[in-house]
Image (spheres, helix red, strand yellow):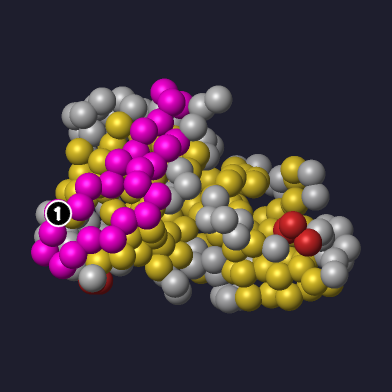
Amino acid sequence: AQKVTQTQTSISVMEKTTVTMDCVYETQDSSYFLFWYKQTASGEIVFLIRQDSYKKENATVGHYSLNFQKPKSSIGLIITATQIEDSAVYFCAMREVYNTNTGKLTFGDGTVLTVKP
Amino acid sequence: EAAVTQSPRNKVAVTGGKVTLSCNQTNNHNNMYWYRQDTGHGLRLIHYSYGAGSTEKGDIPDGYKASRPSQENFSLILELATPSQTSVYFCASGRGLGNSDYTFGSGTRLLVI
């Protein structure tokens, strides 16, 4: 069964610095997709960025990028030049492609990011 | 604009009562999902659906039923609500396979007293 683990419960950083949030996953599939979502203080959950397991290049969207280390089953989220509004809960999630045909995402427990001025 | 709308936003229910949480999506997505979010547990899948008329059990289905009467609507039903079902419930829609992400609703905060 697939499993996603985020070991950092909370992180606090100063504004305009770079932060990395960790995520490790377990899967029997050879092909899978990894996602990061952000939950704001209002509770809204939005999709941020995705990594396809067969791609070697790390995905980048705006000031979000990923550090994909397939041999370590690790997918870190890097936020550069953090802003106050980046304060939120960040969830890592995974979808297997072949073993389960449900399209479901399995989520980690989340990391609370606080960006201080 | 395509969206996922949940109702109600907040609900207080009595133990043993029946609760129905509703979700409507205008994304024309085949798949819909119900998750609950509790402190320390992240998002856990309760039920999901591949399309109108289908419902499937997720990882924590006990105490819940689901109904998908149409492509747009997906309901979560608590026949006999218990205090342990106090939580925040999120509905999501998605194309299901591959690299497609979810669109989430705004959540329903349920308190069972």
Q: Residues within 10 Å of mark 1 (few under 14, many from 20)?
A: few
- Say whether residue B91 is magenta: no
Does the magenta stretch mainly form a helix, a strand or a loop? strand
Instruction: Judge left or right: residue A88 versus residue B69.
Output: right
Q: Position of residue A48 (x, y in %)?
A: 64, 47
Taking depth in this image into account, of A112 and A7 the one nearest to the observer is A112
- Callout 1, which amino acid? Lys
Taking depth in this image into account, of B79 and A79 the one nearest to the observer is B79
Q: Position of residue B19 (x, y in %)?
A: 20, 52
Instruction: Judge left or right: residue B71 versus residue B63.
Output: right
Q: Can residue B21 be seen in this view?
A: yes
Numbered circles on residues, count: 1
Image point (47%, 43%), residue name: B104
Image point (32%, 60%), residue name: B110
Name which quarter of the figure residue B87 lies in: bottom left
Instruction: Judge left or right: residue A54 versus residue B97.
Output: right
Above or below for A44 versus A21: above
Q: Position of residue B49 (x, y in %)?
A: 28, 37
Q: Mark 1 points at which residue?
A: B18
Please state the extent of the stretch shown in magenta in the rendering. Answer: B4-28
